[in-house]
Amino acid sequence: MNNRIILIGIAVLAIGGFLVWLFMASNQPLPGEKIADLGREHITDISDFEYNSNPPTSGSHFPVWAKKGVYDRVLSDGYLIHSLEHGYVIISYNCDKEVVSSQSSVVIQAYAHEGESVEIHDVATDSAGIKPLTRMMVTANTATSFFMPDNPPPVEVELSENFQTEECKNLINQLSAFLDQFQRLIIVPRPSLDSRIALTAWVYIDKLNQFDGERIKKFIETHHNQGPEKTAE
């Protein structure tokens, strides 16, 4: 009888401990800083839209998105925010020695989400004062609505020589290792970034001044495929 009481007591304590652990775990903040949700309207010119972080984590964006991979050029936030909406995690990096101020990002007319093909256009910036990275350079038609690293939009911002150094290439290789573990992941240069590395997911951001594999992996694991729009990739 006494043994039975002891066993019951142990079971009650174990269950109680588990419930306490579960409560504490469920109330722990997710990795990164949570940013206010700015919505997800589709537009084609984001020059007048004000985002609340650099890089943005939500807000109006283009009807075309970027898919998984390492990009060799700066992409408009209009494409990248759409990727975040689909549950992508974006790793932005800045290999410039001096960090410049934040750039404006991307949008106006709504388009359909799915079932659109992609057509690449020449850069539409000109002497009229159109800011780079603020207008959609890809036309959505009727098959898919994304592009990939082997068929990206045209270059709108030239990267400095700092992005060609061995140090920068080593950083890219370190970040690229996560591509084997996660399907919805984009790695992209961002010379306007005010830190060495930035991790973004829908309404979450984390900034690092040096590579931290464990911290980066934890952010990706937590936020991967957690966007507000569920899609088949």
Image (spheres, helix red, strand yellow):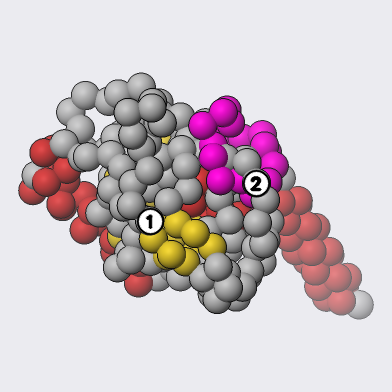
Which residue does the numbered mark 1 point to in the structure image?
121
Q: Position of residue 31 (x, y in %)?
A: 54, 45
Task: Pick the residue in front: 57 or 66.
Answer: 66
Can residue 217 be seen by looking at this rendering? no
Secondary structure of residue under mark 2? loop
Residue 231, above or below 49: below
At 55% from the left and 68% from the top, the residue drawn is 141
Task: Pick the residue in front: 17 or 50.
Answer: 50
Can residue 14 be seen by looking at this rendering? yes
Pointer 1: residues within 10 angstroms few (<14), some, or many (20+)?
A: few
Residue 210, above or below 177: above
Query: The magenta stretch spans which residues?
Result: 30-51
Which residue does the numbered mark 2 point to in the structure image?
109
Pointer 2: residues within 10 angstroms few (<14), some, or many (20+)?
A: few
- At label 1, the amino acid type is His
Q: Tell me which secondary structure the magenta stretch mostly adopts.
A: loop
Work out which residue is located at the far left of the displayed protein and give it: 166
At 54% from the left and 40% from the top, the residue drawn is 45
- At label 2, the amino acid type is Gln
Task: Pick the residue in front: 188 or 6.
Answer: 188
Work out which residue is located at the far right of the displayed protein and give it: 1
Rounded to the nearest angstrom, the CA distance separating label 1 from label 2 is 18 Å
Residue 3, above or below 109: below
Q: Position of residue 144 (x, y in %)?
A: 53, 72
